[in-house]
Amino acid sequence: MELLKERIRQDGTVKGNDVLKVDSFLNHQMDVALFEEIGREFQRRFADCGVNKLLTIEASGIGIACVTAQFFHCPVVFAKKSQTKNIAGEVYTTKVESFTHGRVYDVIVSKKFLGPEDTVLIIDDFLANGAALEGLIDLVNQSGARLAGAGVVIEKAFQPGGDRIRAGGIRVEALARVKAMSEERGVEFAD
Ligand code: 5GP
């Protein structure tokens, strides 16, 4: 998606060798007009997949998923990072290791909001090592829902998540794929 790549070139900053900061338009301050184009593009790529629910993870995925949902005309469910135990068995639960914070979270989704009748598209801001996406995929599998695939805004293709998840037979669409990046040279896209 050219508009997005242009914006990353213009406003993204590279920290160290593997963190791309896009918090002026994607995951702190949010450019909703850009989100609209992102949502339109996800809908174009996953049209005719029968998607009736979007699933994302708090916090950064929520805004993107909400705008995208307006094109799919369906609800958004976000997986919550939780301290509470699944005592009554009323939630699906999995563990996710955070790339940015370096710690492991329990994440949950209520069984009320995901089940075998659903066809789910997972939405997230970044794909790096794949832990966030794999956690969400695990929740979808536990629920018995059908997984249409995953749409991520930015894939850092030099990290292993995308290849591993695609090798597992899951369709992953990334709107911008970063092949390499450095503080000196900025961002280089894969295609
Ligand atoms: P993964 O689980 O695939 O390693 O990382 C995915 C999550 O980590 C995303 O939901 C995102 O919040 C965060 N993340 C990973 N890499 C980056 C990055 O380069 N920049 C930012 N801003 N967030 C990232």
Image (spheres, rainbow, N blue to C red):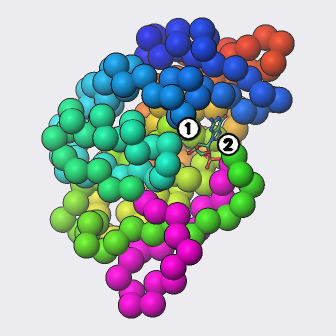
Mark 2: which secondary structure?
A: loop
Residue 139 percent location from the top left of the image: 43, 66
**Residue at coordinates 32% horizontally, 56% vertically from top-left?**
77
Question: Which residue reaches farthest front?
Answer: 29
Mark 1: which secondary structure?
A: strand
Residue 13 percent location from the top left of the image: 70, 20
Residue 113 percent location from the top left of the image: 26, 66
Q: Quadrant of ligand 1?
A: top right
Which of the marked residues, 2 or 1, is nearer the chain's N terminus? 1
- Which residue bears the numbered disc 2? 160
Query: As rendered, which of 163 and 53 lies closer to the eye?
Result: 53
Magenta residues span 79-99
Q: Is the residue indicated by label 1 positioned so its CB lies within 8 Å of ligand 1?
A: yes
The amino acid pointed to by label 1 is Phe
- Which residue bears the numbered disc 1? 126
Tag 2: Cα neighbours inside 10 Å, few (<14), some, or many (≥20)? few
State which mark lies toward you, 2 or 1: 1
Q: Give the side of residue 160 with respect to residue 140, left or right.
A: right
Inter-mark Cα distance, 2 to 1: 13 Å
Quarter of image, res 143: bottom left
